[in-house]
Image (tube, rainbow, N blue to C red):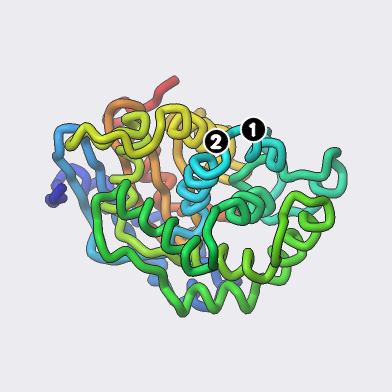
Amino acid sequence: MDCRSDQELLEIVHGSRLHTAKGKVADYIPALAKADPDSLSVAMAFPDGNCYSAGDVEKKATLQSISKVVALALALLDNGEEYVFHRVGMEPTGDPFNSIIKLETTKPHKPLNPMINAGALAVTSMIKGDSLDERLSRLIQLCELITGERGIGYNEEVAMSELETADLNRSLAYYLKQYDVIEGDVEAVMELYTKQCAIEMSCVGLAKIGLVLAMDGKDPLTGETILPPRVASICKTFMVTCGMYNASGEFAIRVGVPAKSGVSGGIMAAVPYRCGIGIFGPSLDERGNSIAGWDLMEQMSKKYDLSMF
């Protein structure tokens, strides 16, 4: 699927780019602090094979929390629903994505959903493989299968930077191990998780992931079922209820499509049966979402009538 420049999208990007000055990049991870706060790109991938893009499309960025969607899909394929949701809940939370408080106050002591960090760590620990490298390889292979792109890798600098500053996530993981939500070596889970978050692709790759989810797990060009419809449905539902951190309800009202954000400034959206959308804009609002990317999604939703509600 080739992606070509679109003037109409470019005009929307120019308008949304003005919002970048209101946010700031994720400087709590040193490697992410190097990102250009004014950068913004978008791609829309459609079932007929057309793809349109605008902005800094050639730039790649790390998936960060967007990887939680792919990891959840793989964990469900590996273990089934019952196993996964015995250890991770299905409910949204109004707390920050890295909060520990609900783990202490909720019984049984399991993360409320797979999109917060505690839940994502638990999900990542469920990915099967005989070694860390094999588990990471299986996750990257699923990314390649969904996007149709080969040679996807991870940013070693970002992964190392995250691992060195992951004390809070490490605390969450050890807490979960205490209650048998995570089994095995916590440090191995931490290394896998940081490398998972550091998987890199462009906004076009994000749009392709969104498209496969939008089409219930099927590649519309080949007709191949990449993810079972049930798995795609679960992923999209969590994207609606929990995908934009603790701003998910507001996003559902203002934009109205399943979406997942990451602190690298990425947004991956799946507009049911219509298109996939990928955005990168590193300047973040106070809740960790791309500030220009959010505005871009709002403008696109209004212009193209994207809301599913």
At label 1, the amino acid type is Glu
Camera-nearest residue between 260 and 82: 82
Q: Nearer the viewer, residue 191 or 135?
A: 135
Q: Which residue is mark 1?
A: 82
Q: Residue at x 72, y 45 (%)?
A: 111
Marks 2 and 1 close (CB-CB < 8 Å): no
Q: Position of residue 289 (x, y in %)?
A: 51, 52
Q: Is residue 32 visible?
A: yes
For residue 299, say whether it is visible.
no
Residue at the location (35% across, 32% down)?
214
What is the x, y in percent for residue 93?
A: 69, 39
Residue drawn where x is 29% and y is 45% of the image:
208
**What secondary structure is marked by label 1?**
helix
Q: CA distance from mark 2 to mark 1?
A: 16 Å
Residue 102 percent location from the top left of the image: 80, 45
User: Pointer 2: what residue?
Assistant: 238
Question: Dot 2: few (<14), some (14–19), or many (≥20) neighbours within 10 Å?
Answer: many
Above or below, 36 against 245 in this view is: below
Q: Secondary structure at mark 2?
A: helix
Q: Is residue 203 left or right of residue 128?
A: left
Q: Callout 2, which amino acid?
A: Phe
For discs 2 and 1, the disc positioned in front in the rendered view: 1
The quarter of the picture where the C terminus appears is top left
Residue 142 lies, with reference to residue 170, above or below; the image says above
Total numbered labels: 2
Tell which residue pokes out farthest to the top in this image: 309
- Which is nearer the N-term, disc 2 or disc 1? 1
Residue name at image x 78 percent, y 57 percent: 177
Label 1 neighbour load within 10 Å: few <14, some 14-19, many 20+: few
Left or right, 157 with reference to 15: right
Q: Position of residue 144 (x, y in %)?
A: 31, 54
